[in-house]
Amino acid sequence: MKLLLVEDDKTIASGLEYSLAKEGFNIVLCHDLASGKKAFKENKFDLCLLDVSLPDGNGYDLCRIIREESEIPIIFLTACDDEVNVVMGLDMGADDYITKPFRLRELISRIKSVLRRYNKDDSNKIIEINNLKINTNEAKVYKNGEEVNLTALEYRLLLIFVNNRGQVLSRSQLLERIWDVAGDFVNDNTLTVYIKRIREKLEDDPQKPKIIKTVRGLGYKVGD
């Protein structure tokens, strides 16, 4: 998943960029309002992390610009937790805020929580990836306009990938999420078989997958 991080403190920013990248997020880092606005116009993001205090404006200005065009999740990073600032950010459409200094694990937990809520609210839709269309209302998958028959667990595994588009998912993460969703026992070998079957059904060339990509030594991901 691609995140926009706008933070003027370069020490904090570089630390966050490194740590979030280790979590599998693709980070676009900006240090001021102008570059943040430019990055938003030129990219498609899954979530924005905005520092309130910026050298050429503030995070509220950027939040306003983003909300004019998009409903993507926004989390404010703020050094001030007084009620007026918090309410102002939330009233402008922010989804959450976190006060500096904060623990990294808390921020990551907030990010994932917001993304889960967003994905749940946005679950009834058609998702398009390459030559695939996934109709989540009907739980159907189409390749080049023709329906592809997936088993229930294959479909659930595919949804886990597409709902975490751009994020590297380890095998242990996939096993944990399949267990949570399906309540079925899936071991490491079974996971390999399911991914192989999905690729055979969806990829033009299963030996050179373009949809579910292997990230050597780390796991798998869908998207860039």
Image (cartoon, rainbow, N blue to C red):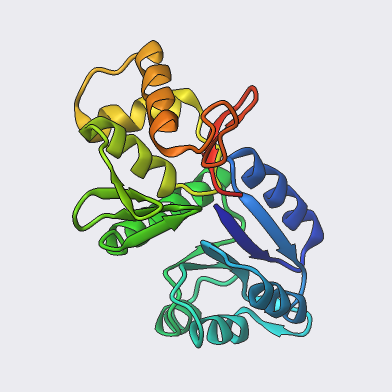
Residue 76 sits in quarter: bottom right
Residue 152 sits in quarter: top left
Residue 7 image-quadrant placement: bottom right
* Residue 78 shows up from this direction: no
In this rendering, position of residue 144 left or right of residue 25: left
- Callout count: 0
Viewed as shown, does residue 30 lie left or right of 192? right
Picture coordinates of residue 15, whole percent (x, y): 73, 48
Instruction: Say above or below: 219 vs 78.
Output: above
Residue at image point 70% right, 60% down: 28
Please tell me which residue is depicted at 52% across the width and 51% down the height of the picture.
107
Viewer-nearest residue: 178 or 159: 159
Residue 46's place in the image compared with 183, above or below, is below
Q: Residue at x 43, y 75 (%)?
A: 71
> Would you say 221 lies left or right of 37 here?
left
* 90 up-or-down from 79: above or below: below
Residue 138 visible in the shown view:
yes
Q: Nearer the viewer, residue 198 or 171?
A: 198
Residue 146 in picture, x, y percent from top left? 32, 50
Q: Where does the image place residue 38, in percent across and percent down from the top left? A: 72, 78
Residue 9 rendering spot, x and y as whole percentages? 77, 64
**Which of the pair 215/6 is nearer the observer?**
215
| Residue sitting nearer the eye, 64 or 198 | 198
Identified at 42% across, 78% down, the residue is 90
